[in-house]
Image (cartoon, grey):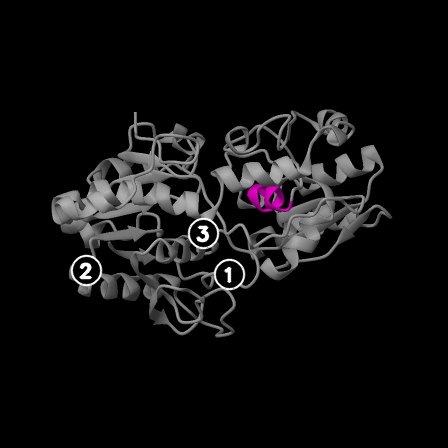
Amino acid sequence: MKIAQVSPLYESVPPKLYGGTERVVAHLCDALVELGHDVTLFSSGDAQTKARLIPVRDQAIRLDPAPLKSDLAAHLSMLDEVRRRQGAFDVIHFHTDMIHFPMFEALAPRTLTTLHGRLDMKDLPEVYARWRQFPLVSISDAQRICLPRANWMGTVYHGMPASLCRFTQESRGYLAFLGRMSPEKGPDRAIAIAKAVGIPLKMAAKIDPADRAYFETEIRPLLDHPLIEFIGEIGDADKSEFLGGAQALLFPIEWPEPFGLVMIEAMACGTPVIAYPYGSAPEVVEDGVTGFLVNDVAGAVAAITRLKDLDRAAIRRRFEKRFSAEAMAKGYFGLYAQIAAPRLGSRLASRPLSAHSADAPRPSA
C-alpha cells in the first residue's frame, strides 16, 4: 500500500529532545516500511526515517534559530505539497489536527486524521461537526469523551520500537519525572510524593515559554531540597538510563491526557508507572501489573511501598504486547485497508488486518 504520512513541523521526526507527535510519526513510518509498505513522509528536512522523505522545510520550527518564523505559513506550504502529490497515494494520514480540512475536502474519503491533543476546547466541536467527512482516529478511548459524536473510525494506541529503551532488571533507588514543567503534568505533586516517601526524585523536563512563569514561581523554589534533582530536557539517547534506573515513573497528572508516551517508555525499561487516573492513564496502566493508579499523594506513597510486588520483566512483556511500534502499525493498517478498499479492492487480501483487541483499532461506537 502507498501511504503518505503528514507530520507537524514543530519538531524533527523524531524529535531531538522533548516531543510526542513527531516521535510517534517516526515510529509509525519505520514500522510500516518494515511491514513492506511504500511510505512517504512529509516533514522537515532534518527527519531520520526509513520512509521516502519529502522535506518541506529545512529544519523543525522549535529549534530553528531564526528570530522570525511562521508556523502557519510552513504548514500551509506543506499541505499544498501534499495536495499536489495526492494522486501517488492510496491513503493520506494526517497528524496535523484540523488545519488540512478546508484544503482536502474533496479527498476526505482517502484520508485518515489522528488527533494527538486534548479535545476539551471551546471551538473544536463545531470544526469536527462542520467537516464530519474526515475519518478520525483517537489515541485513547478517553480522548473521545469531549467529542463523542465526531467521525471516529477507531482508537490506536501509540507504540515504539522495542529496541529503543533497554530493559533494566534492577533500579538504582530513585523516582523519575519526565515531561513538561506545566501545572497539568504535576511536577509539584511529584516533588511532594518524593518528599513524603523520602526517596530521591530526578526530574527531566522541558520548560515551554508558556510555562516559564509557572516554573520560576511555583517549581524552582521546590528544587532547593536534597532529594530533588532537576536535570533539564533529555532526548531518546538518555531515556533508557534515566527511566531504567528509576524505581517508578511518577505521572501525577490532573488533566485529560490523550495518551502519555512517557508511560510506555518507562514500561519498555521495565519501570512501573504510578499515575493519577485521568485521561488515558487507566487504559495504559494496568493497575497492579504495570504500575498503580492512585488518587493523591498519600495513595502514591502507599503504592511506592508495593513496588516490590511488581515484576519488571513482566512489565516489559506487557509493553511488547500492547505498545510496540509493530502493534501500532498493524492497528493503523486495519484502518488504512478500510479506507483504501474502494481503490485497491482485492489487492488488500494479502495483507494482515488487525483484530479488535487491546492492540488493535477500536471501531467507533
Residue 292, percent from left and from top: 65, 28
Mark 3–mark 1 distance (CA, rounded to whole Å) = 10 Å
Mark 3–mark 2 distance (CA, rounded to whole Å) = 22 Å
Which residue carries the number 2 mark?
86
> From the viewer's perspective, is 178 left or right of 174?
left
Label 3: element kind? helix
Q: Which kind of residue does numbered mark 2 sit on?
A: Gln
Asked whether residue 241 is drawn in magenta, I would say no
Circle 1 Cα neighbour tier, 10 Å, few/some/many (<14 / 14–19 / ≥20): many
Label 1: element kind? loop
- Can see residue 66? yes
> From the viewer's perspective, is 45 left or right of 230?
left
Q: Which kind of residue does numbered mark 3 sit on?
A: Val
Please give the count of numbered marks on the rendered protein: 3
- Can see residue 134? no
Which residue carries the number 1 mark?
15
What is the span of residues highlighted in magenta in the rendered image?
Answer: 263-269
Which residue carries the number 3 mark?
24
Identify the residue shown where x is 56% and y is 55%: 164
Circle 2 Cα neighbour tier, 10 Å, few/some/many (<14 / 14–19 / ≥20): some
Mark 1–mark 2 distance (CA, rounded to whole Å) = 26 Å
Q: Nearer the viewer, residue 338 or 226?
A: 338
Q: Is residue 31 above or below residue 9?
A: above
Sequence-wise, which precedes: disc 3 or disc 2? 3
Identify the residue shown where x is 65% and y is 59%: 238
Q: Main secondary structure of the magenta part?
A: helix
Q: Are marks 1 and 2 in contact (CB under 8 Å)?
A: no
Label 2: element kind? helix
Sequence-wise, which precedes: disc 3 or disc 1? 1
Identify the residue shown where x is 40% and y is 28%: 145
